[in-house]
Image (cartoon, grey):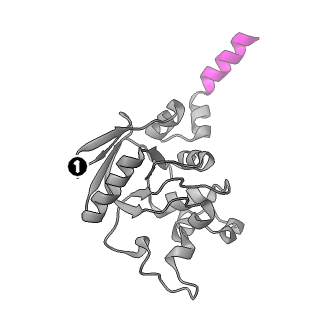
Amino acid sequence: MKQKFNVITSTCVPLPLENVDTDQIIPARFLKATTREERFFGDNLFRDWRYKADGSLNKDFVLNDPTYSGCILVAGKNFGSGSSREHAAWAIAGYGFRVVISSFFADIHKNNELNNFVLPVVVSESFLAELFESIRKNPKTEVEVDLPNQTVTNKATGKSEHFEINGYKKHCLMNGLDDIDFLVQNQKKTELWEQQRK
């Protein structure tokens, strides 16, 4: 979903598990889907954790716990490892998450999130641990993610960290552009450059 980014302030959904791979984010059987509907993939985010084998709701899984809500997912170290399936990013975006915070992302998954207007924010392990603790103490804890200034702030403690992002991807997120939109927007500049090169 193309949405412009600026400053996002939200409560969070905590997933304090390390090495969450793309098969856990969206199981392989959903890769055969013939739809790209965000709702379809969002409904099946963490499918095998959200539902029991008989199809009933797993009330112990965090996405099924009404205590937690918001458009920020706070995840453990090494989020999005495993296969390079873009469907994992589709599922995260389709569920409604706009930001994922972790201390480490698998590179391909990180780029897939950026390409699907989900902002992956890398923080230190100490900041992540403090964030999990704040959310545990108070599920209404808010986090502010400021893309223009590249900062993430735990509103419960007031502590902030700076995060890195590729300049091109930052521009695209802030302007609601995918790669094709960016090329179309710069078509005249490209044509002028080509004429000058002749």
Q: Which residue is mark 1?
A: 157
| Residue 32 higher or lower than 148, as above or below | below
Q: Quadrant of the C terminus?
A: top right
* Residue 80 occupies quadrant: bottom right
Q: Residue at x 45, y 44 (%)?
A: 122
Q: Residue furthest right?
A: 198
Give the percent coordinates (x, y) of residue 170.
47, 35
- Residue 139 lies in what quarter of the image? bottom left
| Magenta segment includes 76 | no
Queried whether the magenta region covers residue 197, the answer comes back as yes
Most foreground residue, 91 or 159 = 159
109 sits to left or right of 6: right
| Residue reaching furthest to the front | 126
* Type of amino acid under label 1: Thr
Q: Quadrant of residue 62?
A: bottom left
**Predominant secondary structure in magenta?**
helix
Q: Crowdedness of circle 1 by 10 Å Cα count: few (<14), some, many (20+)? A: few
Report the label total: 1
Residue located 42% across and 44% down the image: 123
Whether residue 18 appears in this view of the structure is yes
Picture layout, residue 169 above or below residue 16: above
Which residue appears farthest toward the bottom when viewing the image? 54
Q: Is residue 139 visible?
A: no
Residue 165, x across and y down, in percent: 48, 36
Q: Residue at x 71, y 17 (%)?
A: 194
| Residue 131 percent coordinates (x, y) | 33, 54
Q: Secondary structure at mark 1?
A: loop
Residue plotted at (62% across, 39% down): 180
Nearer the observer, 86 or 60? 60
Q: Position of residue 112 (x, y in %)?
A: 59, 49
Toward the viewer: 190 or 87?
87
Look at the image and give the residue range highlighted in magenta.
187-198
